[in-house]
Amino acid sequence: DRDTSGIVLFAKNEYIQECLVKQMKNDNFIKQYIAICEGNIGEIGFSNIINAPIARKESSIIERCVDSTGDIAITHFTVLDNFNNNTCKVLCTLKTGRTHQIRVHMSYIGHPIIGDTLYGSASELINRQALHSYKVCFIHPIYKKQVEYIAQIPQDINNIIKK
């Protein structure tokens, strides 16, 4: 997602890529995102799992949708904060990695990401979707030690939180 801020991981060769893919399949690769969503999903600390298959929308080459013919897609989420401007801060942990997964899932449960013009609506609060690739954690393919990378939340998302 080109308008998602934060961490992007690139494998420099096929061996490293295969190691990382294997970790993803075995749940040894953790991907977490911070999203600012419309509405109040629940009290701080409320967690849930969205298990809804995602497919390509028939009328689009870009847009995805929840559809029974789609591929399995699982997103865990936890409400981190609720704000006075009818938005909430959510931590999303991906168990699968479908295209636009968090954006599709949050819209599907009625809480689209702020500023997401594809699955929600534009916002005066931010000029992109308020989605940030916050943390990745995996076993380093060469050194065999767990590594963790965290990207600070960018100013445009922090500005939403402060309003």
Image (cartoon, helix red, strand yellow):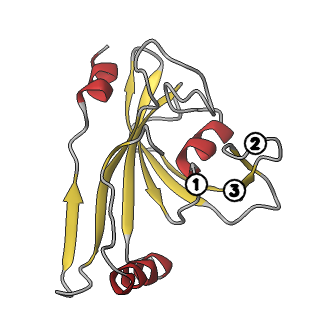
Q: Residue at x 40, y 20 (%)?
A: 126
Q: CA distance from mark 1 to mark 3?
A: 13 Å
The amino acid on which the numbered mark 1 sits, given as a three-letter code, is Thr
Mark 2 lies on a secondary structure that is: loop
| Residue 109 or residue 129, whichever sits in front | 129
Position of 114 relative to 57 (above/below): above
Please give the label number shown on residue 146. Answer: none
To which residue does mark 3 refer?
52
Tell me if 104 is positioned left or right of 60 in this view: left
Q: Position of residue 16 (x, y in %)?
A: 33, 82
- Percent across and percent down for residue 21 are 45, 78
- First in sequence, mark 1 or 2: give its number: 2
Classify 10 Å Cα crowding around label 2: few (below 14), some (14-19), many (20 and above): few
Residue 61, percent from left and from top: 71, 47
Compared with 84, 59 (above or below) is below
At x 44%, y 76%, the residue is 27
> Which of the two labelled residues, at mark 3 and mark 2, occupies the earlier sequence position?
3
Front residue (pair 129, 79): 129
Asked whether residue 109 appears in the rendered view, the answer is no
Q: Is residue 147 above or below residue 58?
A: below
Q: Residues within 10 Å of mark 3 (few under 14, many from 20)?
A: many
Circle 2 residue? 60
Residue 89, image quadrant? top left
Q: CA distance from mark 1 to mark 2?
A: 13 Å
Of the residues shown, which amino acid type is indicated by label 2?
A: Ser
Answer above or below: position of 23 versus 37. below
Residue type at mark 3?
Ala
Disc 3, SS: loop
Residue beneath disc 1? 99
